[in-house]
Image (spheres, rainbow, N blue to C red):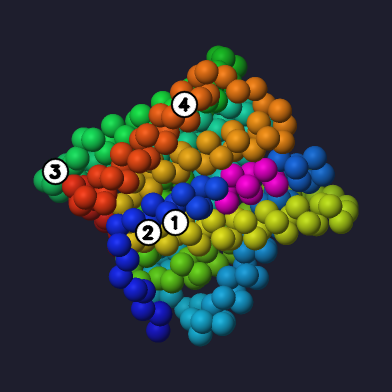
Amino acid sequence: MSRARPATGPLRAPLLITGAAFLFAAMGLCVKLASAQYGAGEIVMYRSAVGVVLMALLLRAGGTPLATRVPLLHLRRSAAGIGGMCLWFYALGALPLATAMTLNYTSSVWVAVFIVGAAWGGGQRQDARLVLAVLAGFAGVALILKPTLDARQLLYGLAGLVSGLLSARAYLHVRSLGQAGEPEERIVFYFAAAGVAAGALLMFVGGGPHPHTVRGVLLLLATGVLASAAQLMMTRAYAIGQAMTNAVLQYLGIVFSFGFGVWLFDDPVTVSALAGMALIVASGIGATALARRGNTRIPPPTET
C-alpha cells in the first residue's frame, strides 16, 4: 500500500518547485566541475546510481514496496526524461551553452502548449494570463542567455528543441503518476534506474570510464544527492500543484545558475541579464498568485 499524502495548500507546490530549481542549479554547478574529469555518460550513470541507492533506502524505511500498479506510466516517464536528457547532452556537444540551455528550457513552453491543447480539446476554459506568464518567463531566459544559432547547427538545435518537448512530457507524466497515488520515492527510483542503464550505455559508447580521484568522487556524490533531492521536490510539486505554475517557476533555475556563475566564475553582469531575471521573477510571482487565488484550473493530461 502507498502511504497517504496529506492535503496541501496552494502555496506548498511553488515552494517545492523553487527549492528544486535551486538544487538543480547547484547540481549543474557540480556537473560543470565534474565534466573536467568525467564524460557526460559517466556523470549520468553515477548520478542515477546514487539516486537508486537513496530512493531504495527511503522506500525501505517507509515500508513502501517497489511494485507498482502503473508500470507503463513509469516507463513513459523514464523514456521521456532519459530521451530528453540524452538529446540535451547531444546538443550541448555542438551548440553554445547559452543556446542549449535556452532550448532545454522550452520545456515550460511545451508544458503550456500541451495543457492548453488538452483544455481546449475538452471544452474547458484556460486562463490566458498563466500562458502569458510562461511566455514572459521564457523571454527572461532568452534575455539572460542570449542564444545564437547558425545554419550548420540546425540539427543540434532541433535536438535541443526536442529535448525540451520530451522533458515537458516527462513532467506531465510525473503529474499523472502523482495523481495515480504513486509515492515520489518510487517515481524517482524507477527514473534513476533507467538513468543508470542509459548512462552506462553512453559511457561505454564514449570510450569507457575514467579513473577516480577524491575530488571527482565527492563531486559525483554531490551531483547524485542534489539531483535526488531536487527530483523528489519536483515530483511532489507536480503531483500536488498547478503544472503551468510549476513550469514558470522552473525558470528560476536560470537565475540561480546565473548567480553561481557570477559568484564563482566571474561571469559578467549585464543590463539584459538583470532585466531577464526580473522578468522571470515577476512571471513566477504572477503565476503563483493566480494559482493561490484559485483562478486557474488545469486539467491533468489523459493517461492510460
Q: Nearer the viewer, mark 2 or mark 3?
A: 2
Secondary structure beneath dot 3 equals loop
Q: Decide whether the magenta segment is chiefly helix, strand or loop.
A: helix
Q: Position of residue 162 (x, y in %)?
A: 47, 36
Q: Residues within 10 Å of mark 1 (few under 14, many from 20)?
A: many
Secondary structure beneath dot 2 equals helix
Q: Position of residue 101 (x, y in %)?
A: 55, 33
Which of the two discs, 4 and 3, labels the residue nearer the N terminus?
A: 3
Are circles 2 and 1 on residues that touch, CB within 8 Å?
A: yes
Please name the residue that numbered disc 1 is placed on.
16
Measured in 3D between alpha carbons, the distance from the residue under mark 2 to the one under mark 3, in whole angstroms, is 25 Å
Which of the two discs, 4 and 2, labels the residue nearer the N terminus?
A: 2
Measured in 3D between alpha carbons, the distance from the residue under mark 4 to the one under mark 1, in whole angstroms, is 22 Å
Please name the residue that numbered disc 2 is placed on.
12
Task: Give me the disc on residue 276.
Answer: 4
Which of the two discs, 3 and 1, labels the residue nearer the N terminus?
A: 1
